Structures are given as structure tokens and as C-alpha cells.
Amino acid sequence: MFVGNLPWTMDWRALKDIFTDYEPTFATIKMSDSGRSRGYGIVRFDSSKTTVDELVNKFNGMTVNERDIVVREDRQ
């Protein structure tokens, strides 16, 4: 899953914690060459336990540290 509009201070652990009830298997925050957050991350799940629609419906638009996050299927 692509997760955008993240707070600049968020790390991969905090990102993974948002989705803890869905047992994420991987989370990362994408960083620029200078080491600064690019404001988005990727979270992966065991596909047999979680559906894309379920995650988008529950988390897209959720407010995290005063920012409304964007959650959608990753396009990679």
C-alpha cells in the first residue's frame, strides 16, 4: 500500500503501528538523497489476510498528527 501525506517526523515503526491490527509485514518511509522524508511510505501485508479495499476504506483520509493521510494500492 502507498501511504502519502505523512508527517515529516514519522519513521517506519510509527507507520507500521498505524496498521498494526492488519499485521503488516513491511513498512518503509521513502527518503530523499539528503536524508529527509519525502512524505510517503510503503506498507506491505500478507495478502491472504487483508484486502486493498478494506485498507483504503478504513485508512484513506485518516488524520495522523494533523495530516490527512492518503492510502491507495501501490502502483509498483
Image (cartoon, helix red, strand yellow):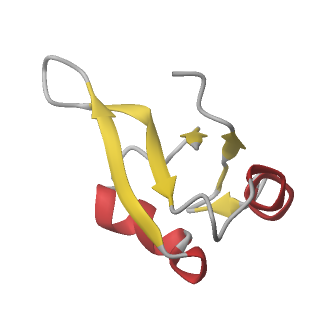
Residue 17 vertical position relative to residue 46 in the rendered view, above or below? below
Q: Identify which residue is drawn at 24% across, 21% down.
A: 32
Q: Identify which residue is drawn at 60% across, 62% down.
A: 64
Total numbered labels: 0
Residue 21 vertical position relative to residue 4 in the rendered view, above or below? below
Q: In which quarter of the image is the N terminus?
A: top right
Residue sitting nearer the eye, 67 or 14? 14
Res. 72 image quadrant:
top right
Which residue sits furthest front? 48
- Residue 4 in the image: x percent, y percent? 58, 37
- Residue 43 in the image: x percent, y percent? 47, 51
Q: Identify which residue is drawn at 51% across, 78% down.
A: 20
In this rendering, position of residue 9 left or right of residue 41:
left
- Residue 58 in the image: x percent, y percent? 81, 65
Residue sitting nearer the eye, 62 or 17? 17
- Residue 73 in the image: x percent, y percent? 67, 37
Residue sitting nearer the eye, 38 or 66? 38
Res. 49 image quadrant:
bottom right
In this rendering, position of residue 72 left or right of residue 24:
right
In this rendering, position of residue 71 left or right of residue 32:
right
Q: Identify which residue is drawn at 59% across, 82% down.
A: 21
